[in-house]
Each structure stands twice: as C-alpha cells, then as structure tokens.
Amino acid sequence: MSINGKAYIAGAFEHPTRKAIDKSLAQLHAECAKGALEDAGLTKDDVDGYFCAGDAPGLGPLSLADYMGLNLRHVDSTETGGSSYLIHVAHAAEAIALGKCKVALITLAGRPRAEGMATGTAPRNYGANAPDVPFEFPFSPVVANMYAMCAMRHMHEFGTTSEQLAWIKVAASHHAQHNERAMLRDVVTVEDVVNSPMISDPLHRLDCCVISDGGGALVVVAPEIAKTLNRPLVKIKGAGEAPKHQMGGRIDLTYSGAAVTGPIAFAEAGVKPADIKYASIYDSFTITVLMQLEDLGFCAKGDGGKFVADGNLISGVGKLPFNTDGGGLCNNHPSNRGGMTKVIEAVRQLRGEAHPAVQVPNCDLAVAQGTGGSLGTRHGSATLILERE
Amino acid sequence: MTEQTLFPAPTVDPETEEFWNATREGILLVRHCKSCESAHYYPRTICPHCGSDDTYFEQASGKGTIYSYSVMRRAKIPYALAYVTLEGTDISMMTNIIDCNLDDLSVGQAVQLKFSKTVDSEFQVPTFTPV
C-alpha cells in the first residue's frame, strides 16, 4: 500500500507575524488554522483529524482541540522537532487512505523572539531523563556548534569551503528580496557571508537562519474533497521519515537522515531527483542545506559545495531553485521549526502562487525536505514529494 | 576553555552510576559488549549495536583523536566542542578540548584525556587536551 495519490494539500497558510509580543501561543495556532482552512475553502467544522508537535502548548492536541473547538476522530502528535510537520503530512495521507479522517489540519506556532530565547547559542537541557544529557550537556553543545561540527567534518573530508556554503545564503537572499515579510531582504554576496562575524567555526552569522515568531498550517484532504474545492490540486506523491542518531558512538557527521528518507520518498513517488522542478530544503544553517541536497541525490556525496556554487539554487538562474520565500535563512523560522514553511512554499510553487519574480515556470513536481533536532547528534528527517495534478 | 573553571554536574542514574563513580578516581570507563565484541558510547546496559545485555565496563586508554570540533565564539568564554574518537575503538564521544590554543585545533589532532571538575559534585567530566 502506498500513499501516492491518496490525499491532497488543499490549504496552506503562513502567519504574517515575525514578532508576536501581542499574541498568545494558542492564539497563533488558531490563527494559522483559520488561515489554512480559509485558503482551502473549508471551516473548522469540516476538520476531523488534527496534527501538532512539541511546539503546541499544554497537552498538545488535547489542549488545542479544546481551545479551537475541534470535533475530531483522529489525532497525531508525532514529535521530531522541526521536521514534524512534513511527517504529519505523510501521516495525514496515511490516515485518510485508511479512512480514519477526511480533513486533516496541521498547525505549528511559536514565539521564541517574543520570549527572548537565545535559540542557537544557549545550551538546551531536554530533561534529566534523556539518556544522552549527562554525557553531552556538561560540554555546552548548542545548536550552532553542533551543526558547525558537521560543517567542519565536511570540509575536512571533501574540501568544502566557506565560500561554497555562502552561496546558499546568497541564493536565499536573492529570493527574500521579493518577499515583503522576510526578516532579511538585502541581497548579500559571498564576501558578505564569509566576512560576517564567526559564530562557531566554521559557521558565520550569515550561515545561520533567523530567529522568528509566527507559524503556519496545512490542510490535507481526501481526493473526493480536494476535487470539490476551488484550489489547484497538490497531490502527495511520496514520503519518507526516519531518525538518524549517533549509532552507539559510531559518529558519522557527513550525512543526514535524508540519505534514508530521500530514496524512500522518491521510490514511492516513482520519480528521480532530476525530475524535481523546485526544492524546499530545511535551512537552519547553510551546511544543513548542503548535506541534505547531497543525501537526496541532487549530487554525489561530497560534491555539494560545487553544486550550490555560482547561483545554482537561485530561481531563474540555477538548475535547482530552492526556498523561494527566502527560507529560514532570510524569511522566517517560526518556533525554531522550519519544516512547516518548507511545505507551504512548495505548495505555493506547485499552485503557481509564489512571487512572480521567483515562480518556477510550469512547476509540477517539488520536494520538501525537513530535519528536526540536531544534525550533530540526533535528528528526524522527513522527505515529501508533491505534484500538481 | 582554559579559563573555564567548573562544568555543570552530570545527572547520575542507576544505569550509569558506575561510570560516574569511576570519574571521581580519574578513570574513563567505556561500555563493551561480549556478544558483538564492540564498544559503544554513551554507556547502556543493552548494547545498541546488537541488542545483547552481556555488556561490561572497561577502562579507556585516554588517548584519542579529534573527529570534529567547533570553537563557539558567541559565549562569554569561547570554548571548543568536539567529538573525540577513542584509541582502539570505532567510537567517538562528545567532549570539550581544554587547556589549548583554540585557534590551533584541527581534525585528526591527537588528544589526551584530562578530567574536569564539576559544580557542587565529586564527579568529573571527561574532557581532553592536545598531546
């Protein structure tokens, strides 16, 4: 059994806020839900399945179903950090295929900026019972230095350079200039990136994503419902999900979980990386993009630096337009979880609703790739292949 | 990290008490599996490689090489986070490289175990310094 063709993304909404001092967390979730349902032409009374992750307050789906007044017969709170929402899309398609629900709502929201969180540079303690914590927390692993260790090893093994990584930010900035809601709209150069202050060697400030509040939501529906709605048909064609971890200490920082989830998703969809017209790639840092592009098969392992250089990821310039909203690197990174916005921009591209300056002509096949947790320790990878019908 | 005085104390649970007790004597224990004859880190009762519960601790030599590292510059006192591959094994552990010139570290560099004291605890944490 496959989910290929069993469900469609009918609604997508990105919250316009980037700093939500005046809103509660539950309110942000509800505003995202309302936006996505209105986009689909549905109401909350149509929703019978609800999906959320660790960013949801209280008891997750229980608290938010209560808050939003949802009448449900299916819930799923799979938590794999920032990749959760791509997995939710796949799980929604599975649930719909099995008849467990017909209209699935997925929400994400957060306000790390309003709360003054030092997202990338302060240690996070995931709780005393997490078995890894006593062996890692004392050494102050933070988000930035864990991803930096991946970049350092990639440079060591494959000769990847800071200039090559910088091209990823350059491409994102070329796209963000057209997005009036993007936090960083100035077009930057390779020199700007490598001359920005060092955060954690070899990652500079401009190798890092923004910290933002906000959120997003998606509505996944059964085919018979999708066909009654006045929206372009965005079909879920394939999906892969898997954690990657330390393998009992056999650490290999040169690849991500996308090496597992990419082939699974492409096989289910029956397409190849060369068929992809647009790619949404999780971009917490430039190195995150580079490793996932290699692992998804857009180039050979170790060739990512050459692949991203010279504007190859810029829409209208290169061979693989990526993150045309500016991505996490320039646009937003709500709740420090960029998976939701990756799916939203892929949906825009497939509908032909991206900004005209970055819209990929005849964009009928897209990949959305998410990574959640830390590339340097343990993370959840999720790959989605979406097609405009 | 040269300037850092004390590390946060680890949380000790029944499964890892033996490991942490050894740190008080300046000994680094690595968990091994009799069934698949391999080492793993951090220590577990059940081997994460093969699933056997026939596991035991053995003292590590304390020698290793830097698998990867990064110097965190955006901290009050910059420090080096690293994975160090332990001599005679295929496993790497997260640690800090201390008592060093932070601008002089490299992947593949030889390092030596040097325990660091923790806050309000007799347990030490396994850190490394260049040979």
Image (tube, rainbow, N blue to C red):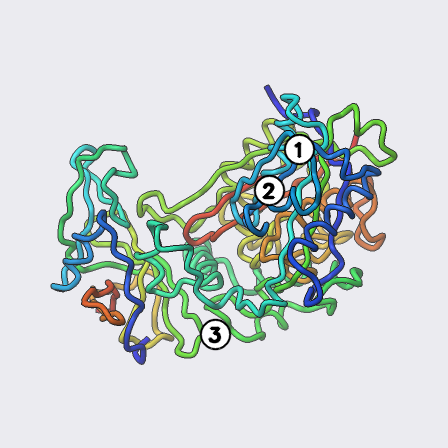
Indicate the secondary structure of the residue bearing disc 2: helix
Instruction: Residue A76 in the image: state x and y as whole percent.
Output: 58, 36
Instruction: Residue A219 in the image: state x and y as whole percent.
Output: 73, 38
CB within 8 Å, label 1 to label 2: yes
Instruction: Residue A88 in the image: state x and y as whole percent.
Output: 61, 38
Q: Amino acid at mark 3?
A: Arg
Residue furthest right as drawn? A230
Indicate the secondary structure of the residue bearing disc 3: loop
| Residue A168 in sight | no
Q: Amino acid at mark 1?
A: Leu
Residue annotated with mark 2: A61
Can you say which quadrant of the picture contains the N terminus of chain A? Answer: top right
Evaluate whether label 1 is on the same chain as label 2. Answer: yes
Mark positioned earlier in the residue sequence (1 or 2): 2
Task: Please name which of the two marks, 2 or 3, marks the residue nearer to the observer.
Answer: 2
Residue at x 70%, y 62% (from the top left corner): A23
The answer to which of B104 and A223 lies nearer the viewer is: A223
Residue annotated with mark 1: A72
Q: Chain of mark 2?
A: A
